[in-house]
Amino acid sequence: MPHKKTHKSIKDLQRRIAVYEDEAAYKELFFLLFPSLTRFAEGILQSKENAEEIVSDVFIAVWNDRAKLNKIDDLQLYIYVAVKNNAVRKAKQLNKNSTVSLEHIHVEMDSLYQTPEERMLSGETVGKIETAINNLPNKARLILKLAKEDRMKYKDIATLLNISVKTVDNQLAIALKKLASAISEPLRKKK
């Protein structure tokens, strides 16, 4: 079962890396964030190999600058922004004419069902939810992933994507409304 990232645990790992040069804490941080960061970068680059390379390079930079880590207020956001910037730079390098917009970032989501209660949802319901998620516009799916799967704060998502908190809120509302109607639609038809 994937462990939930908490701001507190990332802060603790950050401190252990910066103060004690703790390699175990660095590895824990890496394994905690690597899957989500890779999916995020892959959404920009459309290449798992390039995405993994970008994320690995960012983590190498984090380790190399470990003495300065205590000056970073929100390490998770800092790493996401670094991955985004490097992925956008790489995308432009690979395709000279490309511009990367939120509408073009296509991310895959992990299962949203982490607790035993959530896993008890019927396969049919889970299938409907996953179909609804896959049918969301890229922007809404990306924001849903960052908020619900990566547990980022709305203000951090807004900073990362260069949009307003209101836009984050609106996109999440759209996504959740579509998911709710995907689940309730079959229930209405059965009457």
Image (tube, grey):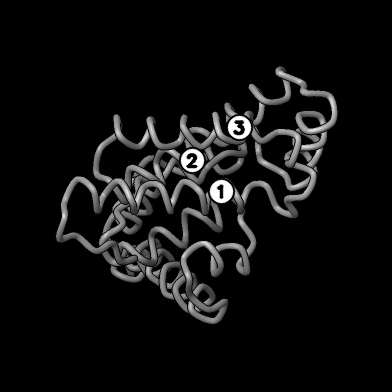
Marks 1/3: CA distance? 10 Å
Identity, as a three-letter code, of the amino acid under mark 1: Asp
Marks 2/3: CA distance? 8 Å
- Image marks 1 and 2: residues in contact by CB distance under 8 Å: yes
The residue where tag 2 is placed is 36
Identity, as a three-letter code, of the amino acid under mark 3: Leu
Residue 32's tag is: 3
**As drawn, is 16 to the left or to the right of 147?**
right
Say few, some or many: other residues with alpha carbon within 10 Å of mark 2 (under 14 / 14 to 19 / 20 or more): many
**As drawn, is 143 to the left or to the right of 104?**
right
In the structure shown, which secondary structural element does the residue marked by tag 1 occupy?
A: loop
- Image marks 1 and 3: residues in contact by CB distance under 8 Å: no
Residue 189's tag is: none
In the structure shown, which secondary structural element does the residue marked by tag 3 occupy?
A: helix
30 up-or-down from 132: above or below? above
- On the image, the x and y values in percent for residue 16 come to 81, 29
Residue at the image position 84 percent from the left and 24 percent from the top:
20
Residue 150's tag is: 1
- Image marks 2 and 3: residues in contact by CB distance under 8 Å: no
Marks 1/2: CA distance? 7 Å
